[in-house]
Image (spheres, grey):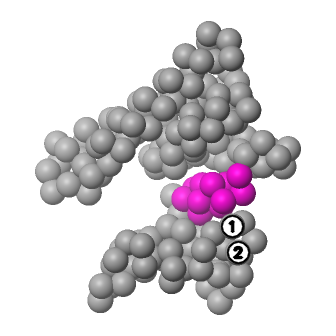
Amino acid sequence: MTHDIAALAVELTDMAAADHRTALLANSDDPAEQLAWRRLTARHGDRLGEIMAEYGWPTAELVGEEAARAAWLVAQHADRQLDIQRSALQLMQQAVSAGAAGQRELAFLRDRTLVNEGRQQVYGTQIAGVKDGAPVPWPCEEPERVDELRATVGIEPFDEYVARFS
């Protein structure tokens, strides 16, 4: 790894670590804490946009497994920057086609982007809320096929997935 790429890998993993440390603020009752989360994710989204403009999608081959996963997390959480999410989705799709990124992460990013666009998701990865103690997904294009579609990209069945959160 050249110095620039090594520094990029560290920067991406640092962004993911900051994201993990502050993720609970996203749904805080304190507006100041929610705003801090939004500022962080917006700053990270902006930076990911710059990285993608310079390097394309930061694949594991380019920056290492951990930093590539960090880039995906930053894209997932760029909820108020649809241009960044759409760009990440397009670049990640190309990386998946080239065998340089995972279908599972791409599926999560596709669903997240669709939900943020106000559309129905494909794989049922995005949870809208909890009703009677059970997680409820945002509406899906083909709810009766969700588990079948999830299996094609290496995601466990919906009931197993949500059982981890209860």
Residue pictured at 82% horizontal, 46% vertical:
99
- The quadrant in which residue 41 appears is top left
Q: Magenta stretch: residue 107 in it? A: yes
- Residue 142 x/y as whole percent: 67, 83
Percent coordinates x, y for residue 153 in the rendering:
72, 66
Which residue in the protein does label 1 denote?
A: 154
Contact between labelled residues 1 and 2, with CB atoms less than 8 Å apart: yes
* Chain part drawn in magenta: 102-113
Percent x, y of residue 34:
24, 47
- The vertical placement of 30 against 147, above or below, is above
Report whether 100 appears left or right of 29: right
Q: Main secondary structure of the magenta part?
A: helix
Residue 138 in the figure: left or right of residue 18 = right
Judge whether residue 163 can be spotted in this image: yes
Q: Is residue 60 magenta?
A: no
Give the side of residue 159 with respect to residue 2, left or right.
left
Q: Is residue 117 visible?
A: no
**Which residue lies under the disc numbered 2?**
151
Q: Is residue 146 above or below residue 86?
A: below
Q: Identify residue type, mark 1.
A: Gly
Is 82 or 137 nearer to us in this picture? Answer: 137
For label 2, the crowd category at 10 Å Cα-Cα, with few meaning under 14, some 14 to 19 and many 20 or more, is some
